[in-house]
Image (cartoon, rainbow, N blue to C red):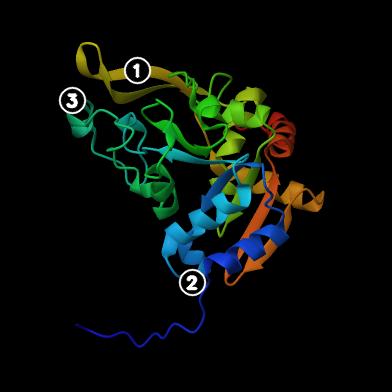
Amino acid sequence: MKSSNRVIRQMLTKEQLKEQLSLLGVKEGMTLMVHASMKSFGYVCGGSETLIDAVLELLGYEGTLVVPLQSSDNTEPSYWQNPPIDVSLYPEVRKHHPAFHMHHSDCSNMGVFVEGVRHREGCIISSHPNAAFASVGKYARFICRKHDLSFPFAENSPLKACVDLKAHVLLLGVGFDRCTGLHYAEHLSKQRAILLQGSAMDTSEGRKWVKYLDYNHDSDDFVYIGEIMRKKNMVKEASIQTSVCQLFSLEDAVKEGVIWLSKQNVS
């Protein structure tokens, strides 16, 4: 086995994570939507399992953890960009992509933290084939109870349920461009173009490629919304080892997002 010259000189334990997250503002009883890059922390003893344990223990029995569980390739192939796919393969993707399964589908692009939450005992997952959410805790069933196929970040969605619950967002080593909650601001602003989207789904007639409506989402704009929120002191920020961590109100983010998006020609 080839050895590495890199020596681990720092590490984080569950208790250290709990202490630092508590100082940042994570509290018992919160509904908390988390986006996390495990690599940003350096070495965490126990990896994502340790971080999930730390968050859940801080939230307690009255709290709820929420993560987005998006299956990025179970989408209309003509919209793919990174990388794009040859036009000749569009029909093949629509014909052969597996139907979404909340426990089996590949959502590895969301990272090991999300995968860890997804497989937690008691985790509830919403039914959307492309934009599902996974949740653990007191309000998990309430959050995931309904999820419209068209416009999956709109009124009848786990995201709106999180807004209703006065949820907070915790960004761990990632930027505002990863803030799924701001897709609800895109919906409210009515500034995005509407697309005909598609995904493979199990239906009463078997596996089918099903078409539905969605907005032309662009999370790159969310960075500017984050800058505004920081200038208004709406974001609590701290470093945990090498990870820059940010905590803020989802409701505040949506309000600021609607204001910013409504002033832009962003369709």
Q: Residue at x 44, y 82 (%)?
A: 8
**Structural crowding at the residue carrying mark 1, measured as other residues with C-alpha within 10 Å and reported as few (<14), some (14–19) or many (≥20):** some
Q: What residue is pinned by disc 1?
A: 211
Question: SS at mark 1?
Answer: strand
Between discs 3 and 2, the one toward the N terminus: 2
Tell me which amino acid carries mark 2. Gly
Q: Nearer the viewer, mark 3 or mark 2?
A: 2
- Kindly report the distance in space between the C-alpha atoms of the residues bearing marks 2 and 1: 42 Å
Question: SS at mark 2?
Answer: loop
Instruction: Please tell me which residue lies in front, 20 or 248.
Output: 20
Q: Residue at x 38, y 31 (%)?
A: 130
Q: Residue at x 59, y 42 (%)?
A: 61
- Kindly report the distance in space between the C-alpha atoms of the residues bearing marks 3 and 2: 41 Å
State whether residue 267 appears in this view.
no
Question: SS at mark 3?
Answer: helix
- Mark on residue 2? none
Q: What residue is pinned by disc 2?
A: 42
Give the side of residue 149 with respect to residue 140, left or right: left
- Kindly report the distance in space between the C-alpha atoms of the residues bearing marks 3 and 1: 13 Å
Instruction: Please tell me which residue lies in front, 96 or 33.
Output: 33
Residue 153 horizontal/vertical position (percent) = 53, 27
Q: Image quarter for residue 127? A: top left
Quarter of the image with the N terminus in it: bottom left
Q: Name above or below for residue 76 compared with residue 35.
A: above
Residue 4 horizontal/vertical position (percent) = 32, 84
**Structural crowding at the residue carrying mark 2, measured as other residues with C-alpha within 10 Å and reported as few (<14), some (14–19) or many (≥20):** some
Residue 133 horizontal/vertical position (percent) = 46, 34
Tell me which amino acid carries mark 3. Lys
Tell me which amino acid carries mark 1. Lys
Q: Name above or below for residue 131 compared with residue 225.
A: above
Q: Residue furthest top?
A: 205
